[in-house]
Image (cartoon, rainbow, N blue to C red):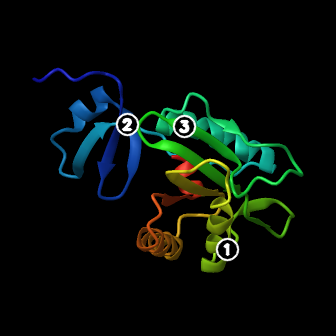
Amino acid sequence: MIPINTEKMTLSTSCEKSIVDASDIQARRGEKDILEWRLMSTISQFFQPPLYWQQFEELAAGMLREVYDVANAQQYGRPGQAQDGVDVYGKSPRYGRIGIQCKRLADLDERGNPFPGGPVTRKFLRAAATESLAFSQSLSLWILATTARRDTQVQGFVDELNKDWEREGRNRTALVWSWDECIS
């Protein structure tokens, strides 16, 4: 008999998925209804976006530090000041100067609670991107971080924008971080 670790494992059958001890799997190995078993490796959970835009900007600064190794990532300016389409910025040793425009786009449900959503239209994206061109430091990467969910149409808008910037000779790339990227 092959020894099996007694850690918790996931048992998948044709009808159910449950957590069982490894000893149960070993005892049931001969049964026909077992299709596969594997160790549980991840726990899935959905996080609601922040209630306040300040929290979202703080999250974006933390993500910039971690994702692009930007030790000096910081929020730009303070409320009421012109920010030229950049809420968070810093310099990456690999990618150069990076700016993030944070847009907490949310609608309210029937109980008045915020949930991710809100439209990122072509016009909205273009306006934000154009505003970022006025930023005092040259950016190699501009990111629109939003609480809206990932959307193929929005990703297409970003592709169009990057093609236009390339045609115009701008040494800049645009990305969109949807809420799905922010929490994964």
| Amino acid under disc 1 | Phe
In what element is the residue under mark 3?
A: strand
- Does residue 51 lie above or below 132 as drawn? above
Which label sits in the foreground, 1 or 3? 3
| Amino acid under disc 3 | Lys
Horizontal and vertical percent for residue 62? Answer: 62, 35
How far apart are labels 1 and 2 at the CA level?
42 Å
Residue 173 seen anywhere in this rendered image of the structure:
yes
In the rendered view, does 30 fall on the left or right side of 147? left
In the rendered view, does 64 fall on the left or right side of 21? right
Mark sitting earlier along the chain (1/2): 2
Dividing the picture into quarters, in which one does residue 149 lie? bottom right
In what element is the residue under mark 1?
A: helix
Residue drawn 54% across the image and 37% down it:
91
**Residue 91 numbered tag:** 3
Camera-side residue: 132 or 103? Answer: 132
Horizontal and vertical percent for residue 17? Answer: 39, 49
- Does residue 66 lie above or below 5 as drawn? below
| Amino acid under disc 2 | Met
Circle 3 Cα neighbour tier, 10 Å, few/some/many (<14 / 14–19 / ≥20): many
- Does residue 45 lie above or below 85 as drawn? above
In what element is the residue under mark 2?
A: loop
Mark sitting earlier along the chain (3/2): 2
Residue designated by label 2: 40
Residue 45 seen anywhere in this rendered image of the structure:
no
Residue drawn 64% across the image and 39% down it:
61
Which label sits in the foreground, 1 or 2? 1
- Does residue 115 lie above or below 67 as drawn? below
How far apart are labels 3 and 2 at the CA level?
38 Å
Q: Are marks 3 and 2 in contact (CB under 8 Å)?
A: no
